[in-house]
Image (tube, grey):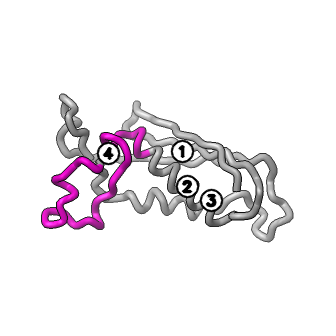
């Protein structure tokens, strides 16, 4: 990724060994269901796998959005002005919400979903949301 209009080395294309984690809390553990679990973490893990070896960009990064220059399958567009660790966490959180809503459309439980993204040894960002599904 790179940070457009940022006056430092982050303005240049660079990579990170991102590390991510999901924390899920529910108001009640659904013991009566066949799976006997609150969520399938394998489905959430696929969110992180999808981002692996991709160029994370903002919608205003015309260079990497040019299909003549870069294969669009290798580019993921983040919301916001730049693909910051904050926006990567929000992206993963949005994807997790979609997964949970798809898996459990009528469960009726409240979930507290938290995603933490570690960009470097010292830089973490945590995004969270309450969801009923």
Q: Do the residues labelled 4 and 3 touch (CB within 8 Å)?
A: no
State which region is magenta: 59-88
Task: Kindly state the secondary structure of the residue where label 2 is placed.
Answer: helix
Q: Earlier in the sequence, mark 1 or mark 4?
A: 4
Nearer to us in this view, 60 or 97: 60
- Which of these two is toward me, 124 or 74? 74
Q: How far apart are marks 1 and 3 (CA)?
A: 14 Å
Q: Name the residue under label 4.
A: 16
Residue 100's mark?
3
SS for dot 3: helix
Q: Does the magenta stretch include residue 51?
A: no
Horizontal relation, residue 65 to residue 115: left or right: left
**In this figure, which residue is indicated by the disc labeled 1?**
115
Nearer the observer: mark 4 or 3; the answer is 3
Q: In this view, does 98 lie above or below 24?
A: below
Residue 20 higher or lower than 52, as above or below: above
Q: Residue furthest right?
A: 32
- Which of the two labelled residues, at mark 4 and mark 3, occupies the earlier sequence position? 4
Query: How far is mark 4 from mark 3, CA to CA?
Result: 27 Å
Q: Mark 2 vs mark 1: which is more N-terminal?
A: 2
- The mark closer to the camera, 2 or 4, is 2
The mark found on residue 96 in the picture is 2
The disc, 2 or 4, on the residue closer to the chain's N-terminal end is: 4
Q: Quadrant of residue 101?
A: bottom right
Mark toward the viewer: 1 or 3: 3
Q: Is 84 one of the magenta-colored residues? A: yes
């Amino acid at each position: 990724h790179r940070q457009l209009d940022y006056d430092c080395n982050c303005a240049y294309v660079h990579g990170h060994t991102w590390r991510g984690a999901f924390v899920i809390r529910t108001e009640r553990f659904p013991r009566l269901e066949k799976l006997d679990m609150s969520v399938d973490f394998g489905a959430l893990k696929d969110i992180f796998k999808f981002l692996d070896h991709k160029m994370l960009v903002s919608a205003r990064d015309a260079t990497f959005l040019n299909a003549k220059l870069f294969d669009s399958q290798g580019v993921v567009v983040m919301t916001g002005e730049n693909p910051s660790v904050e926006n990567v966490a929000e992206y993963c959180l949005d994807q997790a919400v979609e997964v949970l809503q798809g898996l459990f459309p009528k469960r009726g439980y409240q979930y507290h979903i938290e995603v933490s993204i570690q960009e470097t040894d010292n830089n973490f960002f945590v995004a969270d949301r309450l969801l009923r599904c």
